[in-house]
Image (spheres, rainbow, N blue to C red):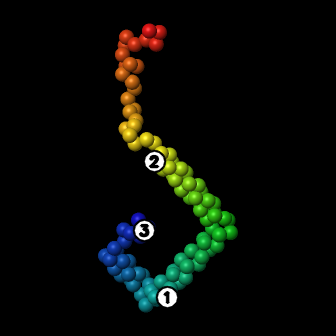
Amino acid sequence: MTPLAFIGTPEIVVALVIGLLLFGGQLPAVLRDIGKLVFRARRSLSDLKRESGIDDAIHDIQREVDDAQSEVSDLYKSVDPAAGPVSREPPQDALDPGFSEEE
């Protein structure tokens, strides 16, 4: 889901009307300045990510997760399908009150 997915046409129209009321004819200049600010903030954030190496660390972790998923998938596929599903129930002998290992 995108961060602004909840904003629809009615909300945009209301925001523009409020903007016109507050800024009048200067609205295009204000929106242009806001756009420049957002662009600079995004560029600064991407520079910070690149310089800190966080993107490389995230990619390394993602690669390790993918490798682990692949190994688990290979192990799962190697299990004999003819053996049937593994029962999570305890064996019936263990539930029998008269059962004793000494017998």
Q: Which mark sits nearer the N-terminus, 2 or 1?
A: 1
Mark 2 → mark 1, Cα distance in angstroms: 61 Å
For image coordinates 36% across by 77% down, the residue present is 12
- Type of the residue with mark 2: Lys
Q: Quadrant of residue 43?
A: bottom right
Using the image as rendered, state which of residue 76 and residue 41 is in the foreground: 76
**Secondary element type, mark 3:** loop
- Type of the residue with mark 1: Ala
- Type of the residue with mark 3: Thr
Q: Are marks 2 and 3 in contact (CB under 8 Å)?
A: no
Q: Which mark sits nearer the N-terminus, 2 or 3?
A: 3
Q: Residue furthest left?
A: 10
Residue 84 at least partly seen:
yes
Please name the residue that numbered disc 1 is placed on. Answer: 29
Q: Compared to 43, does 24 lie above or below?
A: below
Q: Residue furthest bottom?
A: 25
Please name the residue that numbered disc 3 is placed on. Answer: 2
Left or right: where 55 falls relative to 87: right
Using the image as rendered, state which of residue 87 and residue 14 is in the foreground: 87
Q: Compared to 4, does 82 lie above or below?
A: above
Please name the residue that numbered disc 2 is placed on. Answer: 77
Q: Are marks 2 and 1 in contact (CB under 8 Å)?
A: no
Mark 1 → mark 3, Cα distance in angstroms: 27 Å
Percent x, y of residue 16: 38, 81
Mark 2 → mark 3, Cα distance in angstroms: 36 Å
For image coordinates 38% across by 33% down, the residue present is 87
